[in-house]
Image: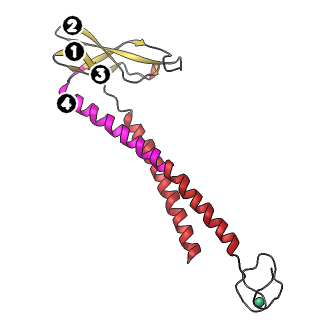
């Protein structure tokens, strides 16, 4: 690298001129790094939005479940049968039916998600509509996992964002 001030030849990676101490110009490289930082920022945005929608949708589902639970009566459900096995494409995954009784009458509540057969509990709390026990559901806390997944997406994107901004600022100072 040739010094612009005194014209002396310096080693390729040296930052200062050996002879006069003049800073050797590296601006073209810096610009490349800056544009790659901006490119990273553009990639972070969809990542952040995915996290946000995961959290939004699961919170909606959680709130609607809580809302339903208030209006519905609780009952002890006993694991009775597996239905619609393989309907999600995975033959090991089934929905479960939980049997519960209201006024000596038997009813069945179907889980809202399909899972591996052996992951269902023998007993599960069931909620039913007092006026019509056929209207029922098995509350699930699976949405909590979606909130966690969403939070991980957001944390990663915020971390990447801060790191990238910091690097851009450091370069400009
Ligand atoms: Zn020089």
Residue linked to disc 4: 70
Q: Secondary structure at mark 4?
A: helix
**Quadrant housing residue 74:** top left
| Image height of 113 relative to 147, above or below | above
Which numbered circle lies on residue 105? 2
- Tell me the SS state at disc 2: strand
- Mark 1 in CB contact with mark 4 (< 8 angstroms): no
Rounded to the nearest whole Å, what is the CA distance between mark 3 and mark 2?
17 Å
Q: Which of the two discs, 1 and 4, labels the residue nearer the N terminus?
A: 4
C-alpha separation, residue under disc 4 versus residue under disc 2: 23 Å
Residue, disc 3: 137
Whether label 1 touches label 2, CB < 8 Å: yes
Inter-mark Cα distance, 1 to 2: 9 Å
The C terminus is located in which quarter?
Answer: bottom right
Identify the residue shown where x is 71% and y is 88%: 22
Q: Contact, CB < 8 Å: mark 3 with mark 2?
A: no
Mark 4 to mark 3 CA distance (whole Å): 13 Å
Q: The N terminus appears in which quarter of the rendering?
A: bottom right
Q: Is residue 139 left or right of residue 160?
A: left
Mark linked to residue 133: 1
Where, by quadrant of the figure, is residue 102 drawn?
top left
Rounded to the nearest whole Å, what is the CA distance between mark 1 and mark 4?
A: 15 Å
| Position in image of residue 77 (x %, y %) | 29, 17
Please tell me how crowded label 3 is: few (under 14), some (14-19), or many (20+) other residues with Cα within 10 Å. many
């Amino acid at each position: 690298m040739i010094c612009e001030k005194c014209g002396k030849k310096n080693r390729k990676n040296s930052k200062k001129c050996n002879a006069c101490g003049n800073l050797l110009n590296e601006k073209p490289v810096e610009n490349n790094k800056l544009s790659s930082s901006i490119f990273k920022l553009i990639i972070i945005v969809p990542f952040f939005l995915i996290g946000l929608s995961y959290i939004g949708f699961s919170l909606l589902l959680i709130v609607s479940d809580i809302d339903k639970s208030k209006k519905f009566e609780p009952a002890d459900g006993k694991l009775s049968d597996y239905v619609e096995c393989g309907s999600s494409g995975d033959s090991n995954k089934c929905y479960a039916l939980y049997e519960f009784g209201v006024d000596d009458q038997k009813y069945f509540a179907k889980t809202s998600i399909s899972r591996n057969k052996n992951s269902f509990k023998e007993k599960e709390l069931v909620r039913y509509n007092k006026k019509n026990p056929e209207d029922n559901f098995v509350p699930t806390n699976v949405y909590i996992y979606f909130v966690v997944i969403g939070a991980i997406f957001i944390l990663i994107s915020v971390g990447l964002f801060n790191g990238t901004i910091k690097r851009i600022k450091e370069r400009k100072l």
